[in-house]
Image (cartoon, rainbow, N blue to C red):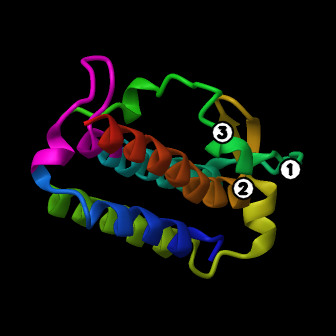
Amino acid sequence: MYGLDEKRNQILDFVNNVSDEEAKKKPAEDRWSILEVLEHLYLMEQLVVYQINRAIKEGDIQETTSKPIHNTTDRGYKVEAPEAVQPNGEFTSIEKAKDGLEKTREATLFLIHNKDEETLKTRAFPHPAFGDMNLEQWIEFIGWHELRHLDQMKEVKQAL
């Protein structure tokens, strides 16, 4: 659904070949470790689920334009992660990170299960770079966001 499984599987395939020791190392003081990137993905999906739930319950019906969310994977364009989704060392191993990611994915799928398309297309909330996006685009964005950070994790591993 929305390409989420396919994109998540790419993340899992990558981290299954990373040791906990590698995952904890930062390539530089101002760069995230692989575990920190995984925590960011976990926090981001958690926040998106919260915002989607809020938009469904309290949001006004609004029309939005389709955004080029596939461009999320372009790492040439940098966006500072909001404080709420910056890692704080919650994960101490790849296994714990995978468990966290599994929990947020279950929450995402539970939330959107049996939601009608009309609701997902007519409720929205703003993205820092793309502006107002409807809930359907937000759901799909989760996967594109993960692919962006998959490239980042590959860069980190290579730099180590």
Left or right, 111 with reference to 37 = right
Q: Residues within 10 Å of mark 2 (few under 14, many from 20)?
A: some
Q: Is 59 or 127 nearer to us in this picture?
A: 127
For label 3, the residue is 74
Left or right, 4 with reference to 120 = left
CB-based contact (under 8 Å), mark 1 and mark 3: no
Q: Name which quarter of the figure residue 43 lies in.
A: top left
Query: Mark 3 belongs to which amino acid?
Result: Asp
Residue in view at x 41 percent, y 51 percent: 46
For label 1, the residue is 66
Residue range corresponding to the magenta coloring: 21-37
Under circle 3, the secondary element is loop
- Mark number, residue 93: none
For label 2, the residue is 137
Q: Quadrant where the N terminus lies?
A: bottom right
Q: Is residue 8 magenta?
A: no
C-alpha distance separating marks 3 and 2? 17 Å
Q: Name which quarter of the figure residue 71 lies in.
A: top right
C-alpha distance separating marks 2 and 1? 8 Å
| The residue positioned farthest toward the top in the image shown | 30
Under circle 1, the secondary element is loop
Q: Is 13 or 61 nearer to us in this picture?
A: 13
